[in-house]
Amino acid sequence: MQEIERKFLVHSLDFIAEAFHSQKIAQGYLNAAPERTVRIRIKDEKGFITIKGKGDESGTTRFEWEKEIDLQEAHALFELCESGAIDKTRYLIKKGKHTFEVDVFEGENKGLIVAEIELSDANETYEKPNWLGEEVTGDERYYNAYLSKKTFTTW
């Protein structure tokens, strides 16, 4: 139940032409504390609950547990979430043997585009697309839980 992930800013919209799938995502937090986040997410017509632990020193690895839940339950739990819901569109782009998830934020986080790649090992190599910008792995400002409280448009 470990998540190994690297996170990057995206400096152009070139990735959209490479996407093989996109979906709308709304997410809220029952608990947005950095030590443990409890997230409710609605992806298109599916609901999920996710618990994440605090990341390691580099921010690359942390505990993650996710379970699909009934959509009606997800909507009911969403109503209990702290203020500051996240709205975004996620694009999936295949590069080599990996898939990048690129999130285009909307609402108060509009203008922010972040790419993530999940790895099987923290030192695993991967192909970097030309639209990939500065690495922000471990920078808490780019965590969705942080963005739900201190939105990108207020930085």
Image (spheres, rainbow, N blue to C red):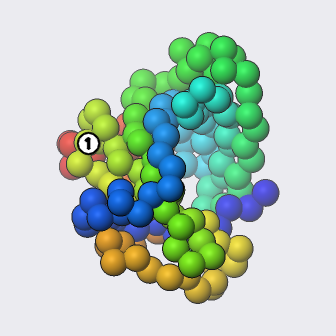
Image position, residue 22 (x, y; %) = 47, 46
Residue sitting at x 28%, y 33%: 107
Q: Viewed as shown, does residue 72 lie left or right of 151?
A: right
Image position, residue 77 (x, y; %) = 62, 19
Q: Is residue 57 visible?
A: no
Q: Is residue 2 visible?
A: yes
Residue sitting at x 46%, y 36%: 24
Relative to 76, is 153 above or below?
Answer: below
Residue type at mark 1: give it.
Answer: Lys
Of all residues, the one furthest to the left in this rendering is: 154
For this rendering, which residue is in front, 44 or 73?
A: 44
Relative to 92, is 106 above or below?
Answer: above
Relative to 111, is 44 above or below?
Answer: above
Say which quadrant the N terminus sits in.
bottom right
Q: Viewed as shown, does residue 140 lie left or right of 30?
A: left
Residue sitting at x 39%, y 29%: 84
Which picture quadrant has residue 61?
A: bottom right
Residue at mark 1: 110
Q: Secondary structure at mark 1?
A: loop
For this rendering, which residue is in front, 148 or 110?
A: 110
